[in-house]
Image (spheres, grey):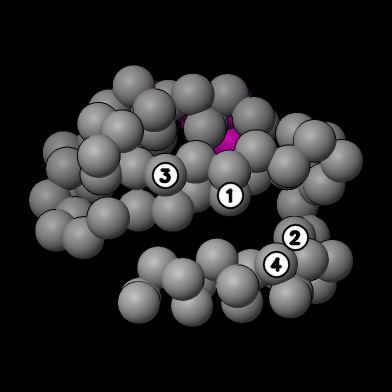
């Protein structure tokens, strides 16, 4: 997705309208969405608004490979 940097940046004004906290989970071995996207989000959201989780050995398919971990993270976020 990083090759589409201009599209990513053009949506920035809309992302800033998100009223809730954000959890961004990204695998460092993702070959479909560049890990640079995580850094981009870190640059536009404050740490109080954005929680990032970087998974060293994961790729793009985290919902299938880390289902239990994701359930835990999401359930903790609504407590």
SS for dot 1? strand
Q: Earlier in the sequence, mark 2 or mark 1?
A: 1
Segment tinted magenta in the rendering: 1-6
Query: Would residue 10 be visible to someone looking at this image?
Result: no
Q: Earlier in the sequence, mark 3 or mark 1?
A: 1
Q: Position of residue 54 (x, y in %)?
A: 65, 38
Q: Earlier in the sequence, mark 3 or mark 4?
A: 3
Q: CA distance from mark 3 to mark 1?
A: 8 Å
Question: Where 9 sits versus 76, above or below?
Answer: above
SS for dot 3? strand
Q: Earlier in the sequence, mark 4 or mark 2?
A: 2
Residue neighbourhood size for the residue with mark 3, other residues' Cα within 10 Å, grouped as few (<14), some (14–19), many (≥20): some
Left or right: 24, with 57 as reference point: left
Q: CA distance from mark 2 to mark 3?
A: 17 Å
- Residue under label 4: 69
- Residue under label 3: 51
Indicate the quadrant where residue 2 lies. top right
CB under 8 Å between callouts 4 and 2? no
Q: Residue at x 55, y 66 (%)?
A: 73
Residue neighbourhood size for the residue with mark 4, other residues' Cα within 10 Å, grouped as few (<14), some (14–19), many (≥20): few
The label on residue 70 is none
Left or right: 66, with 71 as reference point: right
Say if the magenta span includes residue 4: yes
Q: Residue at x 25, y 39 (%)?
A: 48
């Amino acid at each position: 997705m990083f090759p589409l940097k201009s599209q990513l940046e053009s949506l920035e004004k809309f992302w800033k309208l998100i009223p809730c906290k954000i959890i961004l989970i990204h695998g460092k071995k993702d070959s479909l969405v560049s890990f640079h996207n995580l850094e981009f989000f870190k640059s536009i959201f404050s740490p109080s608004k954005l929680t990032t989780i970087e998974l060293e050995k994961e790729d793009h398919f985290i919902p299938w490979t880390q289902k239990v971990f994701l359930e835990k993270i999401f359930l903790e976020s609504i407590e």
